[in-house]
Structure formats: structure tokens, C-alpha cells
Image: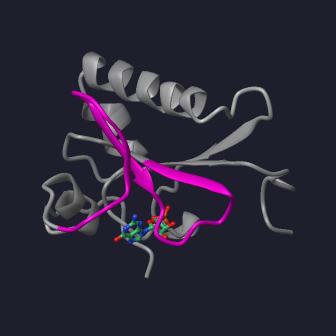
Amino acid sequence: MPIDATLPYDDSNIFARILRGEIPSKRVYEDEFALAFHDINPQAPTHILVIPKGAHVSWDDFSERASADEIAGFVRAVGKIAREHGLVAPGYRLLANVGADSGQEVPHLHVHIFGGRGLGPMLAR
Ligand code: 5GP
């Protein structure tokens, strides 16, 4: 069920629980600003989710309210994780869903990193 990205942050969401270590995830990276783990239902050979450590529903409130350090730290983490997984030379795709029309399901900002094969057209036709 897609979420309403205008609602306030709800810290019972599944990624908040992963951040707190309450439920398991296959972690691949962690620093002061970001945590990354494998998607539970991968759509490509590499499908990693990168989330900021702060309480942000989506790219919308992150881009509006996060500090410059949080934004820089998060963006650098996404790039570093892709590099560490050897995705720069073959290429990869980033995706961040925001709200109902995008189909965003988890109300904690996450950037998908897809790679490991040709990824086809940008959007389903
Ligand atoms: P969205 O549609 O919100 O952009 O993407 C949510 C993603 O989170 C989906 O790709 C889904 O497979 C993944 N996901 C949902 N629940 C869990 C979970 O408990 N653990 C992990 N690792 N991924 C999850």
C-alpha cells in the first residue's frame, strides 16, 4: 500500500526498526549518516537500499529539513556503496520513490541501488 509522503514520520516503520536493530537485515554499509542493506525482494542481481539515519519520510522532507552534513553524508554514502560493489564501470541505477504515485511503501527515505545487469527502460511502458 503506497504511503502518503506528507504525513509526519512514524518511527514504527520497518526501516526505523531495522535501524534500531529490532529486526534483522543483511547490512552492507554503515556510517554516521547512512545504513545500507540488501532488499528483501531483489529486482536486480544487486539491489541495495540506502537509508539516512535521521527520521525522514522521503526525499521531500529530507531535502527540505535535513542538515547540510546529513545530506552530504548520505549522498556520499550512496556513491561509496555503489563503488564498493563494483558498479561504476558496468553502470547502475538509483531510484527514490516519493509518495503515492511512485508506489513508495516504506515511510523512511530509501534510495534503491540497482545493478548487475542491463536494467532496461527507465520506466515500465
Ligand atoms: P519502495 O517501494 O518503498 O520504494 O521500496 C520498499 C522496498 O523495501 C521494496 O523493494 C521491498 O522489497 C523492501 N523491503 C520491504 N520490507 C523489507 C524488509 O523488512 N527488509 C528489507 N531488507 N527490505 C524490505
Which residue appears at 42% of the width and 28% of the height? 77
84 sits to left or right of 74: right
Q: Quadrant of the C terminus?
A: bottom right
61 sits to left or right of 32: right
Does 71 appear in magenta?
A: no
3 sits to left or right of 125: left
Q: Image height check: is 85 above or below 97?
A: above
Residue 123 or residue 89, whichever sits in front: 89
Residue 19 or residue 45, whichever sits in front: 45
Residue 121: x %, y % from top left:
86, 55
Which residue appears at 36% of the width and 50% of the height? 109
Q: Image height check: is 109 above or below 64?
A: below
Q: Where on the picture, by quarter, is residue 35?
A: top left
Residue 117: x %, y % from top left:
80, 51
Residue 74 or residue 125, whichever sits in front: 74
Q: Quadrant of the N terminus?
A: bottom left
Residue 81: x %, y % from top left:
50, 33
Does 45 appear in magenta?
A: yes
Q: Quadrant of ligand 1?
A: bottom left
Q: Where on the picture, by quarter, is residue 84?
A: top right
Which span of residues is magenta-colored?
23-49
Residue 27: x %, y % from top left:
35, 50
